[in-house]
Image (tube, rainbow, N blue to C red):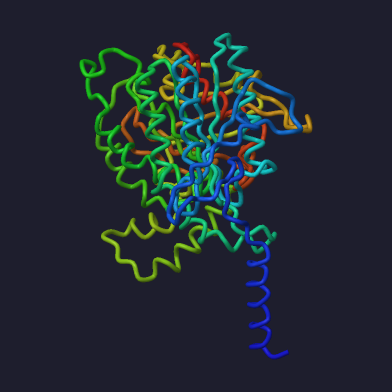
Amino acid sequence: MSASRFRATLWLLLVAGWLAGCVPLRPYHTVQRAAVAIGASNTAQPDVRTPCYQPPDTANGAACVRFVEYDDFGNLFNRAQLDETVEAARRVAEAGGIVVVYVHGWEHNASDGDHDLIAFHRAMQNAQALDIQYGDKRTILGIYVGWRGQSVSVPGISKTTFWERKTTAQAVGDGGVFELFRKLADQRELFRNSRLVLVGHSFGAAVTYASVSHSLMDQIIDDPKDASQDGGETRNRRKRWDMVVLVNAAFEAMQVRPHFELARSRRYLQNQLPHLILITSQADWATRIAFPLGRFFRSTLNKYADPESDDLYETAIGHYIPYVTHQLSAEDDCRRFLQGPPVPPMPDKLGTVVEAKYFCFDDKRAMLPDSTGKHAARPVLLTRCDASGDCSQVAGEHTMLAPPHMPIMNIRTTSDIMSGHNDIWNPTMQGFLVQLMLYIVEGPQQHPTR
């Protein structure tokens, strides 16, 4: 076979694989009705059989997960689904509960068997159980934002969709997801004892960031500069959301540059809490290797105002070392970090985490084994990159030049916390995320790490 015929055959096989494995564009948790006219909106009602998602192979639990689903352009499949979910969130917020929104990433969707959906539900169950053990007994509502992160189901060929799905993620984030976030934020401001957490993974992180980017800039500008502005309140009471957590975020550092430059140009009160927390594994091949390769070919005709812009455009935010603020590493024992002067009590435990030079997450109640019961979670140590060598496991001799209490945290993890792009629900990482989420509602605590 000639070389040209071989290339043509290979191309045909690739196209055939794409077509054969193309994942349909449809919602998974609504009942569809035919539109009454061309261009009419879908007025179908949500599927009343599953008002709260429950994986078939898990025991019944208190945690509820609801859905809001979008097409490739960020349009709602079903407005009734959004309305019902927002109403459920309002009831939780009114009772002082916690609303957690999760936007899945590449190669995932909202189908019942999707690993991300099952793992997110399990994390909500764990968070609910842990909160009960803490004695607070708040209601926790999970909201799963579904979009077509998986467009091709054929193994191997699906890896070629990385850049096509990145474009889609940007469109989804610029579309109707903003409406969901804004309505939930309005409830957070109305019911001040409630909490709102936004979590995005991979291209889901890109969706989330596109939706909150301008609000993030507003919050940094509005952060009080002196105690008279703050009125002595906990900073959580003034926030539109309590945390935005983006894990293995698949978007370029250039998008965060305006926020970093603004955040680094200001001074903050001691009780300032983070608006944005980015967490990326150094072992994430998709954002560490595939991402810059794709950006390199797209950037050949770009013009930059300064030498740093080339790297900012081609590097995913979690791998742009100059912006790394913290290291997250696995530990066998936290006792060696229980030395030195104690950290002053903060308005809540998350404030103590931010204030401490070292903070070890070692609550064994959150360190559950995986579904097989074989792999126990490990404690993890969060370290600020204040001095050379502080973050040597993930960033060499890098130090982060930032004002105290800067409200953006860009955390890079060792590979034993996340072994790759999709390894975000292993017991160690899940235990860390659950503890971090619950710390936003836990009262003042004097933690001895420094």
Q: Does residue 95 appear anywhere in the picture?
A: yes
Judge left or right: residue 90 versus residue 422.
left
Residue 428, horizontal then vertical, whole percent: 64, 31
Q: Nearer the viewer, residue 238 or 335?
A: 238
Judge left or right: residue 393 versus residue 79.
right
Q: Residue at x 48, y 46 (%)?
A: 42
Q: Nearer the viewer, residue 234 or 15?
A: 15
Q: Nearer the viewer, residue 381 or 95?
A: 95
Query: Above or below — where is 392 with respect to 123?
Result: below
Residue 144, horizontal then vertical, whole percent: 55, 37
Residue 116, horizontal then vertical, whole percent: 63, 41
Residue 229, horizontal then vertical, whole percent: 22, 19
Query: Above or below — where is 41 with respect to 344?
Result: below
Outermost bottom residue = 2
Q: Residue at x 36, y 50 (%)?
A: 255
Q: How many marks?
A: 0
Q: Does residue 450 appear anywhere in the picture?
A: no
Query: Above or below — where is 296 with respect to 215?
Result: below
Outermost front residue = 36
Q: Quadrant of residue 309?
A: bottom left
What is the quadrant of the N terminus in the image? bottom right
Judge left or right: residue 368 versus residue 334.
right
